[in-house]
Image (cartoon, rainbow, N blue to C red):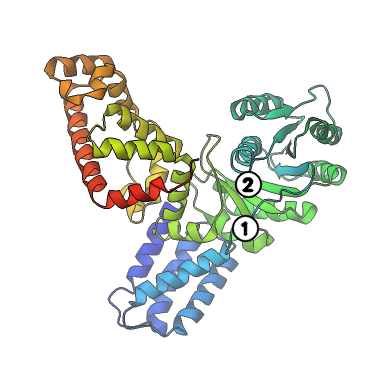
Amino acid sequence: MFESLSDRLEQSFKLLKGQGRITEVNVAETLKDVRRALLDADVNFKIAKQFTDEVKEEALGKKILTSVKPNQMMVKIVHDRLAELMGSESAEIETKGSPNVILIAGLQGSGKTTFSAKLASHLKSKKGRNPMLVAGDVYRPAAIEQLKVLGEQTGVEVYTEEENKNPVKIAKAAIKSARNSGKNTVIIDTAGRLAVDEEMMKEIKAIKDAVNPHEILFVVDAMTGQDAVNTAKEFNNRLDFNGVVLTKLDGDTRGGAALSIKSVVNKPIKFIGTGEKMDALDVFHPSRMADRILGMGDIVSLVEKAQEQYDVDEARKLQKKLAKNTFDFNDFMSQIQQIKKMGNVKDLMSMVPGMGKAIKNLDLDDDAFKGIEAIINSMTPEERSDPKLLNGTRRARIANGSGTSVAEINRLVKQFGETRKMMRMMSSGKGKAMGRALSNMPKR
């Protein structure tokens, strides 16, 4: 996500490196490169020009402190302007109403159905809502079945009327059903088309008029660039939607839609989809996205993801095991499972400042821990509890059982020993303060 833009901007700022001060000449040269980088990322030309003009005006008006280098000041100005371009602050989704009605709109293939299920899961697990999904796409045969499958995965009820081909009546009946069954949120998935057409726009407008939704979200495929922005404008003219959802930001997207859409429709980006899994949905934070675009990572989001999976009781137990030097492969496996719950490994690592460029060409996917898990699962309970038992014969058996080699077993055992030693050092030093802090935390 944004890798090409990040690289281009980094190169642009190097033009100011070593410069004693910001001048009209060197800032113009730098911003010429910045504008090209934005255009290559499929940002609207007028927006790119306005952006660099504003950055130039601010940069030339800044008094540079002696302790701040010109290229550092330029990065700061561009960061703030990028965040402002994308909306400055995150925007909350509306949750009033009984039930609260959320209408999902967008083109076919934009990811509406998957997003609908992700949103239901998000509202259920993080907001304590009791949602119902509504299958309002009566044209795509697989849409109803897809929503049913996703509803089953997330534990959310799906309202369907498979013989009914009138989406307006289905939506109205679903809201009545939700009210009767105590559901406080109704998420209506609607049909899309391959292009904006009058028939589609009339239908989605009719659904809006019939159910009077509290929130209308426009779902757009971020990989379509400026086409996505133009489509958003058409939909907004008809529906006056409340916010935008950018999907497929984990794909090969140049980022133009994310950077342009707020300026064009003057509606906030509320969510971004970063994968196919039901938890691969993030609230959009403009400042954090600006951090990532400029290669600064996103440590706040990383900490938030960790906190979502954080178990205080487990942390206390781990602290005691480290103190007694009894941390074993069972604990190691437990930590791996916690990390996997946080999301895609490469995406997580890219949130660490400075890591984005280092891992750009690495092939890290959801199976990154597969080999380690296979090795540990091939151990006996005794071997997991006491790594000292792992002699040559046992290691050969484990290699055979896990489909790996003895060399890989040896490497894992060595890494495990080094990890345990490092964790014990942390536990005996700064870790003690962390342990005291943990003991004062309320149980989850």
Q: In percent of the image, x 62 and y 58: which residue is there? A: 261
The residue carrying mark 1 is 261
Q: Secondary structure at mark 2?
A: strand
Q: In percent of the image, x 48 and y 78: which residue is there? A: 56
Left or right, 70 with respect to 228, comes to: left
Which sits earlier in the primary sequence, circle 1 or circle 2?
2
Out of 142 and 366, give the one closest to the viewer.
366
Crowding near the residue tagged with mark 2, few <14, some 14–19, many ≥20 C-alpha atoms within 10 Å: many
Horizontal and vertical percent position of residue 233: 70, 56
Question: Residue 87 sits in which quadrant?
Answer: bottom right
Q: In percent of the image, x 37 and y 63: which residue is there? A: 10
Left or right, 216 with respect to 279, comes to: right
Horizontal and vertical percent position of residue 319: 31, 40
Residue 186 position (above or below residue 438): above
Horizontal and vertical percent position of residue 24: 42, 84
- Disc 1 versus disc 2: distance between alpha carbons? 10 Å
Note whether residue 344 is visible. no
The residue carrying mark 2 is 220
Callout 1 touching callout 2 (CB < 8 Å)? yes
